[in-house]
Amino acid sequence: MIRSMTAFARQEIDTDQGALSWEIRSVNHRYLDIGLRLPEELRAVESAVREKVNARLGRGKVDCACRYRPVAAGAAPVVLDEDNLTRLLDACQVVNARLPEVAALNALELLRWPGVVLEQEVDTGPLQKSALALLDQALDELVASREREGEQIRGLLTRRCDSMTELVVRARQLLPEIRTAMREKLLARLAELDTPADSGRLEQELVFLLQKIDVDEELDRLGSHLEEVRRVLERREPVGRRLDFLMQELNREANTLGSKSAAAETTKISVELKVLIEQMREQVQNVE
């Protein structure tokens, strides 16, 4: 099953230490390009996050953002550093003794002073474990989304292949008629000259002209490339680069068919083929 490179996933969870959420966005890119945004509490798991993304995704520009909202500050008790508070109060008394007008001490201002309130250390181990588990869920959602869109792309490419196969068959059916028309046209031109022609030389010229417009090989290669596209679409591994190469090969054969065309019908078929190939190429650019 082929995958698209465009998808979005979001997962969130509430833990004892706060709320966690992951948002993952991916778009098409030549290689796998991972961008991470992590809160300070989860910086230690950056390498583990990259390993998980690398293991699940093959190509694409992937932006992973983790957000952490700790539990409300009022839920935890306020613990004072008594030594720092005593030193701060002593300093305030010294300053107040030198001031002409003494203002009353504000308790909230004292609590804001660095070092007065002890910052409780948070054990980030359980938080990191929860974040990585939530990342797995987000990646599951992202991969499922890429596979759903990839299935739609596969259907579109298959339908375009069927249309191109019909055009190749029609072009092959026209070849005998085109060759006969060319022979008759050459004979008519010679008849207008009212000059006897050497039959051997005439056959040589006719063979030369038919070789110039011979497109059997191009039609054969178009057919084989279309069959290869169908086979590639059934593979499980990433196939975007291979499909992109096949689009180039299909376009080359369609251009050659047009350049060798000796009839309006085959020229029209060449144009229709190139239109379908361009439609396929636009979709292939988004395949992992």
Image: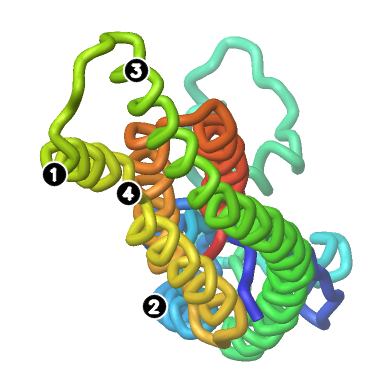
Residue for badge 2: 47
Judging by the rendered image, the residue that carries numbered circle 4 is: 214
Around disc 3, counting alpha carbons within 10 Å, would you say few (fewer than 14), some (14 to 19), or many (20 or more)?
A: few
For the residues marked 3 and 4, what is the alpha-carbon distance in whole angstroms? 25 Å
Query: Is the N terminus in the top left, top right, bottom left or bottom right quadrant?
Result: bottom right
Residue 16 seen in this snapshot: yes
User: Given contact means CB atoms under 8 Å apart, are the residues at marks 4 and 2 in contact?
Assistant: no
Whether residue 89 can be seen here: no
- Return the residue at label 3: 191
Q: Disc 4 and disc 2: Cα gap in Å?
A: 58 Å
Q: Earlier in the sequence, mark 1 or mark 3?
A: 3
Q: Position of residue 73 (x, y in %)?
A: 80, 60
Q: On the image, numbered disc 1 is attached to which residue?
A: 200
Secondary element at image label 1 = helix
What's the residue at 18%, 27% (across, down)? 197
Residue type, label 2: Ser
Instruction: Indicate which disc, 2 or 1, sits on the residue closer to the N terminus.
Output: 2
Q: Are marks 2 and 1 in contact (CB under 8 Å)?
A: no
Counting residues from the start of the chain, the first of labels 4 and 2 encountered is 2
